[in-house]
Image (cartoon, rainbow, N blue to C red):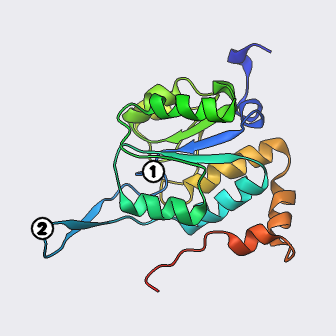
Amino acid sequence: MASQTLTAQDRARRIKVLLYDVDGVLTNGDITIIPDNDGDAVEVKSFAAHDGLGISLARLAGLKIGFITKRNSRVVAIRARDLKIDYVYQGQSHKMDAVEKILAAENCTLEELAYVGDYIIDLPVMRKVGFAIATANARAQVKSIAHYITPLRGGEGAGRDAIDFILDARGILAQTIEKFLDPRNAEAARADIGVGNM
């Protein structure tokens, strides 16, 4: 089958690693900065709980997950830790550098990578991966090259949309959800355990 005739479902069935931008994809893109008394600041981001549970479903289905973002943020590191993300690359002006490292670590091809983006910095990766996904709030340039556009906006469940699409294309979405809901399954118990302000 020639690559230009592949459907979004065909592309989704090949995916082994799902990569996300963060701001505007796993968040709504707002960056709230609260100054402290020492001249530093605390950065605040809001993440969708649906995306966190979706990442647990993806893990159950055998997908590896990564975050690649231009910003350096302690908040992202904490969220990645809570979700047990396989690959976290922050401070990435040229995101293909991180992608090349992930390809080598996973011994997979670009066709086996999916990437979810929303902004022009995501274009170099989205032009090369096997399955390029744009969020509903993505810039027009990003949407124009995407193989799939999520129904929901970044920070409102777009991350989960990407996972649902991939698992549905494989025909395993319903069974993966049931596996997650099984009380004997340890993944459900350990999924997205954050400390918050406790």
Give left or right: position of 160 versus 176: left
Q: Residue furthest bottom?
A: 198
Q: Residue at x 63, y 43 (%)?
A: 18
Q: Toward the viewer: 3 or 58?
A: 58
**Corner quadrant of residue 13:** top right
Which structural element holds mark 1? loop
Q: Is residue 158 above or below residue 138?
A: below
Callout 2 environment at 10 Å: few (<14), some (14 to 19), or many (20+)?
A: few
- Residue at figure coordinates x 73%, y 59% from the top left: 57
Query: Disc number at residue 39?
Result: 2
Count of residue discs: 2
Residue 122 coordinates in the image, percent (x, y): 44, 34
- Can you give x and y, in whole percent of width and height, for residue 106 in the image? 67, 35
Tell me the amino acid under the disc marked 1.
Val
Residue 103 placement (x, y as % from top left): 61, 30
- Which of the two residues, 191 or 49, is positioned nearer the viewer here? 191
Is the C-beta separation of discs 1 and 2 under 8 Å? no
Q: Is residue 147 visible?
A: no
Callout 2 amino acid:
Gly
Furthest toward the front, the residue is 105
* Left or right of 79 on screen, residue 184: right
Residue 16 visible in the shown view: yes
Residue shown at the point (54%, 32%) measured from the top left: 101
